[in-house]
C-alpha cells in the first residue's frame, strides 16, 4: 500500500481508514515498509510514521496516529510536529478534549498532549510557545 499525505478527521491518515481491518492494511504494505512493533492492538510502521490501533479480535481500526515524519497536513491547520505558536496562529480556538488539543471545533482529529497534561484553560498558559506536539491522531467520536 502506498501511503498518501491526506489527513481526514474522523476517517483516515495516509490512506489508512478507521473501521477497516488491520489485516487488510498489513497485507497491502509495500516491501520497503518496516513494521517496528506489532501487538494484539497496535502496529507501528516506519519509525512511528503511522501507528494504527485496533480491536483485538476483529482487528477493526479504531484510531490512527502519525508523527512528525508524516508530511501531510489537515487543511493547513494541523500537522504532527507543530508547536504551540503554530497551533495558535492556525486556529481560532483550542480546547483540551480527552488527552488531545482540538482546534476550531473540528471533531475526530487532535494533537496528543503529554500524559501529565490533560487539561488547560488557555493553551499558552500550559505550554511554552516552542512546545512541540509530536503526534496527530484521527479517531471516531
Image (tube, rainbow, N blue to C red):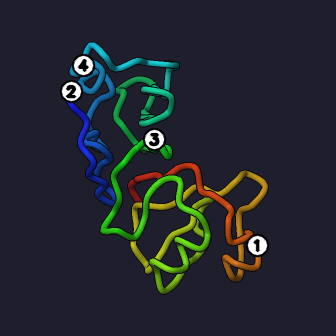
Q: Which mark is residue 116?
A: none
Q: Secondary structure at mark 1?
A: helix
Q: Residue at x 40, y 42 (%)?
A: 62
- CB atoms of marks 4 and 2 within 8 Å: yes
**Disc on the earlier residue, 1 or 2:** 2
**Disc on the earlier residue, 2 or 3:** 2
Quadrant the C terminus occupies: bottom left
Q: CA distance from mark 3 to mark 1?
A: 25 Å
What x and y, as percent, mark residue 129?
A: 68, 72
What x and y, as percent, mark residue 63?
A: 43, 44
Mark 3 Cα-neighbour bin, 10 Å: few <14, some 14–19, many ≥20 = some
Q: Which residue is mark 1?
A: 126
Q: CA distance from mark 4 to mark 2?
A: 5 Å
Q: Which residue is mark 2?
A: 1
Q: Residue at x 42, y 35 (%)?
A: 52
Q: Which residue is mark 4?
A: 30
In the rendered image, the residue lying farthest to the bottom is 92
Amino acid at each position: 500500500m502506498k501511503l498518501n499525505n491526506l489527513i481526514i478527521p474522523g476517517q483516515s491518515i495516509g490512506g489508512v481508514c478507521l473501521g477497516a481491518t488491520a489485516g487488510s492494511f498489513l497485507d497491502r504494505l509495500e516491501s520497503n515498509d518496516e513494521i517496528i512493533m506489532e501487538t494484539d492492538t497496535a502496529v507501528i510502521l516506519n519509525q512511528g510514521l503511522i501507528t494504527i490501533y485496533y480491536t483485538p479480535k476483529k482487528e477493526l481500526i479504531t484510531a490512527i496516529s502519525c508523527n512528525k515524519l508524516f508530511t501531510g497536513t489537515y487543511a493547513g491547520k494541523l500537522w504532527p510536529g507543530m508547536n504551540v505558536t503554530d497551533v495558535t496562529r492556525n486556529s481560532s480556538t483550542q480546547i483540551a478534549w480527552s488527552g488531545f488539543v482540538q482546534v476550531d471545533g473540528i471533531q475526530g482529529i487532535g494533537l496528543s498532549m503529554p500524559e501529565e497534561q490533560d487539561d488547560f484553560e488557555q493553551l499558552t498558559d500550559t505550554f511554552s510557545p516552542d512546545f512541540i506536539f509530536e503526534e496527530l491522531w484521527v479517531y471516531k467520536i
